[in-house]
Amino acid sequence: MKKLLTAAAIAGAAAFGMVGQASADGHACGSMTMAEMNWASAELMANVDKIILEEGYGCEVELVSGATMTTFASMNEKGQPDVAGELWINAVREPLFKAMDEGRLMSAVKGPITQLGEGWWIPPHTAEKHPEIVNDVNALLSRPDLFPHPEDPSKGAFVGCPAGWGCQLSNANLFRAFDMEAKGWLLIDPGSAAGLDGSMAKAAERGENWLGYYWSPTALIGKYGMVPVSMGEWGGPENWDGCIVKPEQECSDPKPSSWTESEVHTVVTTDFQKRGGPAVEYLSKRIFPGPIMNGMLVFMADEQAGGGDAAIEFLIRHEDLWSSWVSADAAAKIKAAL
């Protein structure tokens, strides 16, 4: 790590003095700013990008604190930062597409992490014993007996979201849409993030069955190997946006639906796309498989590691993956820095 930090300092100093030349001759990307979003997978991704671009391509990368709404607004209105590595676009879909249409922003890659999204999950031991419930929502909902409620074992327990979370509304409306009460289920409010996590962890560690809401990439999904279950067909935007995500009094007739697709992009400014050279090409190839990302999130949680330390661990563990994102020359430089 000391070698890496020393090399980064030397490379940064060299790049600082040669930004104009490097940008002009097309062999490097010069200086750039990149959002370091305030959740673990994005922290890891930003720090991996920084090391690869600085060590492999001589870029000068400044990480700036970010969050979905504020980072998008800054990129759209001010053209900074240059890059948002993990932008979950559902909350900014319309203004983002408008900015793309008007030529301010562009997507470098759709899906920088695979197998991500929200939905309903069961432990792997449950999926192994009862494979028929994984891909058939009707088969799942016909077996409340597999998931006994702690206070009323004659009913099935479905663990939703804590009060105040947006997903509480969605799960409550889907509970009604699938007519789960009539099928023998009760909806549990876990009370807090810790309550939701603890509920899943307790069941997974004891070999008990559990059905509830969660999302990936996350450390818990990776740690316990949780399995997503089918929720059936997508019910359409009118049903989802016009009913499922709204309070019950504004959603009188919810229809069954799978969870809305979680769309994530690496977004760059058009200005950076024109001048970024190898950095833009790298970002277009940089895709983290979901299981690898979840494994790294487990490492971050267990070791209380920040994005910088986790990035070094990732580069050491997964050379076969990241070397496919870069040129052979860049791979050699990055490996030497480690």
Image (cartoon, rainbow, N blue to C red):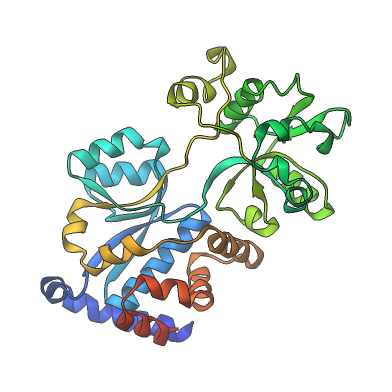
149 left or right of 30 in image: right
Total residue callouts: 0
Percent position of residue 151, x then y:
88, 30
Q: Quadrant of residue 252?
A: top right
19 left or right of 253 in image: left
Rendered residue at 36%/37% (across/down) = 92
Depth check, front residue: 308 or 242: 242
Q: Quadrant of residue 334?
A: bottom left
Q: Residue furthest front?
A: 132
Percent position of residue 291, x then y:
57, 60
Rendered residue at 41%/52% (across/down) = 111
Q: Is residue 38 visible?
A: yes
Q: Is residue 189 visible?
A: no
Percent position of residue 223, x then y:
67, 59
Percent position of residue 263, x then y:
42, 43
Q: Quadrant of residue 133?
A: top right
Rendered residue at 17%/54% (across/down) = 271
233 left or right of 83 in image: right
Please, is residue 298 above or below residue 107 in the view? Answer: below
Quadrant assignment for the C terminus: bottom left
Please, is residue 92 above or below residue 126 in the view? Answer: above
Please, is residue 133 above or below residue 307 in the view? Answer: above
